[in-house]
Image (cartoon, helix red, strand yellow):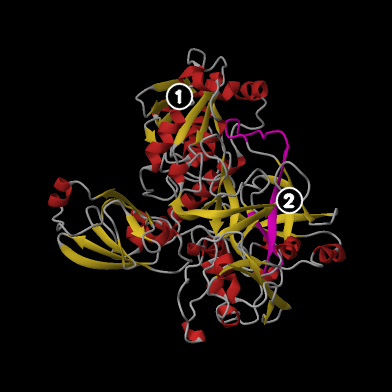
Amino acid sequence: HVQKVVGRVAAGMRLCFFLRPTCLSIIVFSSSRHHHHHHHADAFLFAKMPGSSTVALTSKPSSRSRSDDNPHHGQRFESDDDIPPPVPPPRSISEGSRHLHDDDDEYEPPDLSSRFCSIVLLEVSYVEPEYLRPWQKSSQGGSKGTGFIIPGRRVLTNGHVIQDATDIRLRKHGNSKRWRARVICEGPDVDLAVLEVFGDDESETEAFWEGVEPIQWAAGLPLLQSAVNVVGYPTGGRTICVTEGVVSRIDCRNYRIKTAAAAPGNLLVIQIDAAINAGNSGGPCFDQAGRVVGVAFQGLDGTDAQNVGYIIPTNIARNFLHAIECEGDQTSGNSGDGQYKYEGVQEIPFRWAPLQNKSLRKFLNIPKDGSGVVVTSASPIAQKLHSDFLKENDVITHIDGKSLGDDYTVSLRGDELMNADFLITGKRKGQPTVFDIIRDTNPLKIEATLGPLQSNVPREHNHDCTPEWLVIGGLLFVPLTCPLLSYGSNDDLEESGYLKIYDFIDEQLAKFREEEGKEYIILIDILTCDTNFGYDFKSSWRILQSLNGENVKNMAHLYNIYRNACLAVSGERGAEGKDAGGIADVSNPPIATDEFLIFKFKDKSRIVLETADCMANENDVLKQHGIPTAVSMGTVEKAEKKKNDQGVLEVLDDSESK
């Protein structure tokens, strides 16, 4: 809008652009070499910006006289249309932001402080579970984080900020009052969570929304070197904090830290050089137009990585919000009604190997100019869901029309190459993926609508696992879960063999789940008592394979096998294999070994205990170690459900035979 106004003074001058809250100021500096061409050194030009006050353009002498300061020196302009546009300096409004408003004559860059009303401080009290002692919980802790208002009277923050929260309080900028909040949906794979404000007094809750406005999302990914501002409540003070930086890198990486192998795939992430410290997590990252380009969630510490922060791009956040809105009815009011639900991102349903080895390419008959990756395995569950799906030794050459490199990279924008996972994990729920493959030298096209897959090892507390346990003769059994990795290492743990957990989980996560309901059961401790004397606790941390000759499928199955052995020894189970409830247990008929419990482990070791002795000493073991029950309630409920389902199936089979 000011190009033609300043065009006549463009020759022989340097233009400096300054962003202001309500307008764009352009100061024109004349080079001393051409200063005599202008009649008045202090003359003013005025340009009216749409929807703003008048902008003054001043002409003043420059202290520098190098002719290369003016890229158009010596050129003559016959008309206004010949005048080239002024060259913007670095860190003006980003390209991505400008494109949003090319057709919006009324748009003005907002004052960033006007967005502070959308940003809230989170004060969280939490109690973490203890998966090593699953009947216990840790002592209460507290933390702080940041959140911001989104449409629908909701607050968005990081999942790790509110993890295991028992109480959440929100404080608005410039207000000392605290409001209660609760989690209505959480996405562990994208590290995002949505909160709602609630309270006993409706008028008090309404007061929270006075004077606040939801943020506005930026469209697409920001360009490299775009200026950004991270706003939040980091450690070091009590007031809101703004840090400035630029977009350093767009990458595709794992959001998880401790359990990286358990991730459903890599996701797009934006790296910035603005500091993201503890407390910044969950806060918005604004572009120069005042729109949110991402959510702060990670930073790197150490001398080798200074001022390195990561933000979750807007498309990931908006996909998460879209998914929970699609999954349920929001009219019921709160998460207790179950209207919000999040299953996860579209998961990578295959494992791959690069096609860089010449022998492998020759084996698969790949032409010299061909590129892609070879499928080494595919999810059996995904193969069952789709009539035609990826198979071992298929060569994927394109995903959604984008050519795949031999190292599984694709182009994001121009020459920005990155891991191709984002083509799948970055999709919204229900969007299909098209694979171009070569199978036995034949080109094929496979289209599939992908979704979340159940992991071989449960990933997140309260999402796909909870602490469960079973104590048999002082042997403490738990299911193999990723939260078991959260305890680091110390002398006592190392002595018991805890570090084996990394090998256990890596081995299982390398494979896809093949059947529903399968769990891997591990012995994590031997609680010393007279029953198990002679078996050292240093021999714990082993994967259980079978009990009394029957392969163990899950915790409920293990509990049923043990319970049936106890019933047989105590005489409460009849010769026909019926328990006290009168339901036949065809999966575990009475056998001679019920007198003893023979545990066999994957490492070929075994433990033998007398069933009656385990029953007799059970209460003493529980009392000595402060364990409320020998088995967790969740395991009991699953065992009862399984027994009831077996009873129904047996009745149906009996009626059909008659």
Looking at the image, residue 532 lies above or below residue 44: above
Q: Which mark is residue 460?
A: none
- Which residue corresponds to the image point at 37% horizontal and 37% vertical from the top-left? 507
Q: Which residue is mark 1?
A: 595
Q: Is residue 93 visible?
A: no
Judging depth in this view, the residue of 600 and 134 nearest the camera is 134
Q: Earlier in the sequence, mark 2 or mark 1?
A: 2
The C terminus appears in which quarter of the rendering? Answer: bottom left
Q: Residue furthest top?
A: 534
- Which residue corresponds to the image point at 60% horizontal and 52% vertical from the top-left? 296
Between marks 2 and 1 in the image, the one whose residue lies nearer the viewer: 2
- Which residue corresponds to the image point at 53% horizontal and 26% vertical from the top-left? 489
Marks 2 and 1: CB-CB under 8 Å?
A: no
Label 2 – label 1 distance at C-alpha: 57 Å
Q: Is residue 551 visible?
A: yes
Judging depth in this view, the residue of 230 and 2 nearest the camera is 2
Give the x, y percent position of residue 67: 49, 64
Give the x, y percent position of residue 504: 41, 34
Instruction: Left or right? Give the position of 349 relative to 281.
Output: left
Magenta-tinted stretch: 130-157
Number of other residues with Cα within 10 Å of mark 1, as a class: few under 14, some 14 to 19, many 20 or more = some
The amino acid beneath tag 2 is Leu
Give the x, y percent position of residue 433: 37, 66
Instruction: Left or right? Give the position of 18 relative to 415.
Output: right
Q: Which mark is residue 122?
A: 2
The N terminus appears in which quarter of the rendering? Answer: bottom right
- The kind of secondary structure element at disc 2 is strand
- The picture quadrant where one finds residue 369 is bottom left
